[in-house]
Amino acid sequence: MAKKRASKKSPPLDKRLAQSGKEELIEIIKAVVKREPAMKEVVELAMAAPKPGKPMNVSAYRQQARRTMETESPEAIENGLMDLRDAAARLAKSGDWLNAGAIYHVALDEAVAGYDDLVQSMDRDGDISVVMDDLAEGLGKALEKNRADAKTRWDWIETMLEARLADIELGGIDLAPSAYEAVLKFANDAEWERIVERSRDEAAHSRDWNRGCLIGFLVEGLERRNRAEEADELIRDLGAPEQRTYLLIRERKIEEAMKMIKKILAGAPGWVTNFADALLTAGAKEEALALVLEQGRDHWQNKDWLARYYRKHGSPQEAIEAQRKVFFDSPTVESYKSLREVSRKSRQWEAVRARALAELEGKGKFGALIEIALHEKDVARALELLPRVDTKPGWDYHDYRWEVARAAEKDHPQAAITLYQELAERDIGHRSRDSYRYAAEHLQRAKKLAERIGERSEWEEYLTALRARYPTLRALHDELLKARL
């Protein structure tokens, strides 16, 4: 038998390149770029790498960021920004925060400038804005950790301020929120005065919502600097109507505040509970209650506020009645628990409970009744109610059989088996590989229960009949085999 010739392994690429001369390496790089033009960026960035201890030329990084934001692929934009983020992170890890900040800066600067309506429409899941926030966070750390000169510091801060302004202009989509915090936290007094000047100028020419965001930003910065009086004066001068109203409430100028509130609510009734909470904090309980009642006690938001108000400030009966309205507006387990809590305080729970459940049954809210029964561990009641649930498809339809089956396993195993069988056959009817997998999972649970109560033979008969009913569904039989059924 002839001996196999031993294959000779080539040396690693880095060793072969190390053995090449300068001219040869240049020719190799040119050949790679010619074959794959996109590699030109890699070469340019490698050439832009900083010399230890010296500021770098970031023009290549800026060009890459600009080209990245001009592409029409959200994945390409995300990946391009991630490459820049990672390049900066490597420098930060080595302790070179000045050059790391330089890359974070140009990447964020170009990203903010390029995040237009088209990019926003592509960024459906927010993946691009998440990477932009990473850039802002990195730039904030660089601002904190290195001693950059005044011009460099301001360039970085100005870019983060632009990120904040862009976010406001886009409607508050959380575009690079770390920039907001970094500016508030790390700007020195001189820089802050420039920020105030720029933001005030923007606010003076902005719509109410934009102006409110800008003034809110400045107010937070002034308060952090223990300049509350200046913050209040800024609100009086440039604040949005809502901000001026809150200030009047804090100053206990309730009558004047109420006049402004009425004007605001005429066009924006959704503010009512916010103002009512502020009035409560200021000790104006009667005005707060009257405001909500005047705006309509039947709105769900107002109902919830009134329930909270009466729990704290009203009589037991007022608290119960207000919470009942919340419960029937949204009959969930959580609202049921709140009703139970206020009713028990005055020892009326049994009567209130009976009335509430009877009213739900009269309105045909059997899904809510099942959820409450399961919450109270009354599985027999849940099983009794289950056939009464409306099974017509609709936006609010919910199949309660799975929850009831799980709850019934311990004390009602036969009923649970039946429900799992129904669920399995429902999923088989959907005719997809995933639905067959779900069906097999239901049948696995039913099989364990059948074995537990000594009905293995009955189970085998059922499964044989099930297989025979669907002889052509190969994917179903495959999933049943995988599940060892």
Image (spheres, grey):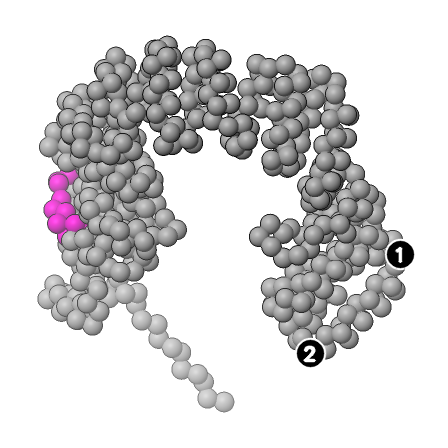
Q: Position of residue 443 (x, y in %)?
A: 74, 60
Mark drawn on residue 389: none
Amino acid carrying label 1: it is Gly
Please, is residue 23 above or below residue 111 in the view? below
Q: Which residues are magenta?
A: 53-62
Magenta span dominant secondary structure? loop
Amino acid carrying label 2: it is Thr
Q: Position of residue 305 (x, y in %)?
A: 53, 25
Q: Give 140 or 111, whichever is nearer the viewer.
A: 111
Instruction: Determine if the magenta segment contains residue 37.
Output: no
Which residue is denoted by mark 1 in the rendering?
Answer: 454
Which residue is denoted by mark 2 in the rendering?
Answer: 472
Q: Compute the Cα span from label 2 to label 1.
A: 31 Å
Q: Which label sits in the foreground, 2 or 1?
A: 2
Q: Position of residue 175 (x, y in %)?
A: 31, 41
Residue 351 seen: yes
Question: Which residue is at 63% across, 52% downward?
Answer: 397
Position of residue 204 in the picture relative to residue 484 (left or right): left
Category of crowding for the residue at label 2, using alpha-carbon neighbours closer than 10 angstroms: few (below 14), some (14–19), many (at least 20):
few
Question: Which residue is at 57% across, 16% downward?
Answer: 312
Precedes in sequence: disc 2 or disc 1: 1
Position of residue 182 in the picture relative to residue 378 (left or right): left
Position of residue 259 in the picture relative to residue 48 (left or right): right
Circle 2: element type: loop
Question: Which residue is at 75% across, 50% downward?
Answer: 388
Question: Which residue is at 67% across, 75% downward?
Answer: 473
